[in-house]
Amino acid sequence: MPPLDHYISQVHLRNFYSRSLGDRVFAMGKSDLTAFAPNSQSICRIDDGNTNPYLREPRAIEEFLKTVEPRYNRALEKLVGDNIDHEAIYTIAGFLAYVMTWSPGGMRILAEPPRRMIESAVAVAEAHGQIPLPPEELAGRSLVELLRTGDIEIEVDRQYPQAVGIANIFRFVAFFGNSAWEILVNPFDRNPFFTSDYPVGIESTIDPRVLNRIVPLAPNLAVRIMPDITIARTPPDFSFARFRYQKKNISRHELIEVNRLIVRCAEDTVFYRDDYAWVREFITKNRGYRIEHETYERSDDEGSLLFFRQRIVKFTPSPPEDRG
């Protein structure tokens, strides 16, 4: 039988286990508001999900995870205790990089830029007469018109951008590990942080090129990573020499905003420690959103230049085939 691989680490989900349920966590689907209470082993997993046929070593991600998952809880203790060392930085940056590249939400998001680049290349090729005319059955409409109307569509195998992601995962670790962090401590025990099947909230900044990432780590702990784009094209520095951080107790308003981001950026399933009466209403109000790429295009006779930026958009969710 193929292995059941978890795209959200079990060690992460266990930190959100309910104190009333013991070894389970409360969960709710954004698409249909179905509530359930799974354990970490039964959720966020895919048969043979850590195997990627585009890689020379199809299960290369397994070796990376061995350097992250066993150190996760120790890293949280170091963040809380102001004892942040190289291991803690690597572990949290590694967890973020893994989720962004390997989870279904991450794969969906990363598949959009290559799809748009293919569409743009098709438009340029057609404009230069490099693509044959469509058959008469299509009423003489061009390929660009067919793409625009949705009669045909380009589909990117999501494991391809996933493979690109794992090939660059250590660069992502170095990038996030050399950025500024805010360690967000939640002092409100009756209002814990949520987490999700894509626990990466994105936050706009004054620089349109930069998005902060907010990552829930435990019900009382999250981190805001503020990337330094000046190091994006420099050789990766695994000493994390440019890492800096500050720690803060967040306000109730900040807590609400973080949880709102977590729900809106979740792919489908939101997890929470305590089943308070306000939780369902909160998820209901914020479920109609997800992360997508916004594309900006500059075109001339020679071709097009595309710019991509992630943003949170309104979206009508539909129930997934499987929440496993």
Image (cartoon, rainbow, N blue to C red):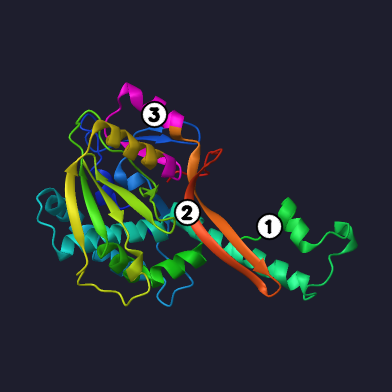
The residue that label 1 is drawn on is 153
Q: Is residue 2 visible?
A: no
Q: For the residue labelled by badge 1, is the local secondary structure a helix, a strand or a loop?
A: loop
- Image quadrant for the N terminus? bottom left
If you read the primary sequence from the N terminus, does the residue marked by circle 2 or circle 1 appear first?
1
Q: For the residue labelled by badge 2, is the local secondary structure a helix, a strand or a loop?
A: strand
Q: Measure the alpha-carbon separation of dots 3 and 1.
A: 35 Å
Q: Are marks 2 and 1 in contact (CB under 8 Å)?
A: no
Tell me residue 125's x, y (percent).
Answer: 73, 73
Q: Measure the alpha-carbon separation of dots 2 and 1.
A: 21 Å
Which mark is on residue 282?
3
What residue is rendered at 32% in x and 63% in y? 228
Q: Amino acid at mark 1?
A: Glu
Residue 274 is covered by the magenta coloring: yes
Q: Depth-wise, is mark 3 or mark 1 nearer the camera? A: 3
- Relative to residue 219, is residue 309 depicted above or below? below
Query: Which quadrant would residue 91 be assigned to in this image?
Result: bottom left
Which mark is on residue 99?
none
Q: Are marks 2 and 3 in contact (CB under 8 Å)?
A: no
